[in-house]
Amino acid sequence: MGDRKRPLQTGEPAPSFVLPTANLEGMVSLADLRGRPFLIGFFRGLHCPFCRRQVEQLAGVQPALLTAGIETLAVINTPVERARLYFRHRPTPVVLLCDPDCSTHRAFGVPRGEFLPDGSSERPEWPYRAAMAQFEAARINPAGEFPEPLHPMEANVVLNARDGFEFDEADNATLTNHGTQLVGHFLVDAAGIVGWAQIEAPDGPNSLCIFPTAAQILAAADSLGR
């Protein structure tokens, strides 16, 4: 799989992938999915409470997608052993794939944020060349869970504490190595062609952790079959 500098767009073919599953046996590949449409979401690892919540949201819309003949998959950049342990106690009908290196995220072009060095004269371009000051000024409250908007990193700390989520060595490594990974969703048709794509925070860090709603996903799925 090659890295893309920009996300896949409607009409482009999905790249090949083969990933281990956390809640099934064996591996899942693009070839396995040929002949049927699927929704695939690319997330940060289990360290991200917003991503854990989004997997639950996908589980909520999965029955409607299945009725429409659309498979639902989520890719998280957590090692498979860690993911299996977590989801053994929190089962989900969504097919969970593990990519700790984010190689599939990159193949689909889901951005990973990069910050310009202090004093750089280069023009910022979110998220590929972001200014640290822009990120430091960001405040989010995507689901209204906080009394007032918080900095994204503070929001993570608050929700992880509220959830009682305890980091292990794998979670700490994932956060260190891939903490600026963004999230993306793609609907792919039966021929392997992207029919809809959505990338987190397209306008800047104030829209971090805002994911597509069930209504948006189902509307996109409906248009896929037309």
Image (cartoon, grey):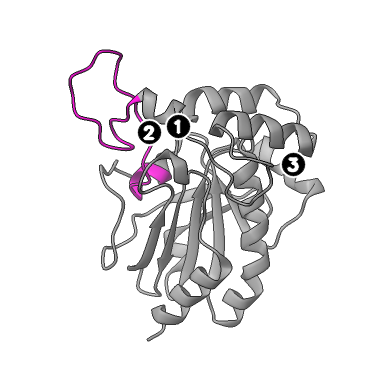
> Magenta region's main secondary structure?
loop
The quarter of the picture where residue 213 lies is bottom right
* Residue type marked 3: Tyr
Q: Is residue 119 above or below residue 191?
A: above
Image coordinates for residue 195, horizontal then vertical, percent: 35, 70
Residue designated by label 1:
180
Q: Is residue 137 above or below residue 146?
A: above
Could you give the CA–CA distance between mark 2 and mark 3, rounded to whole angstroms?
A: 27 Å
From where the camera sits, is residue 36 visible?
no
Q: Quadrant of the C terminus?
A: bottom left
Q: Secondary structure at mark 2?
A: loop
- State the residue at coordinates (62%, 52%): 143
What span is in magenta?
105-131
From where the camera sits, is residue 178 visible?
yes
The quarter of the picture where residue 158 lies is top right
- State the residue at coordinates (29%, 35%): 128
Residue designated by label 3:
86
Q: Residues within 10 Å of mark 2 (few under 14, many from 20)?
A: some
| Residue at the top extreme, as displayed | 119
Could you give the CA–CA distance between mark 1 and mark 2, rounded to whole angstroms?
A: 5 Å
Counting labels gives: 3
Q: Tell which of 24 and 188 is nearer to you.
A: 188
| In this picture, residue 3 sits left or right of residue 49 | left
Q: Tell which of 193 and 161 is nearer to you.
A: 161
Residue designated by label 2:
113
Q: Secondary structure at mark 1?
A: loop
Check if residue 15 falls in the magenta segment: no
Q: Quadrant of the N terminus?
A: top left
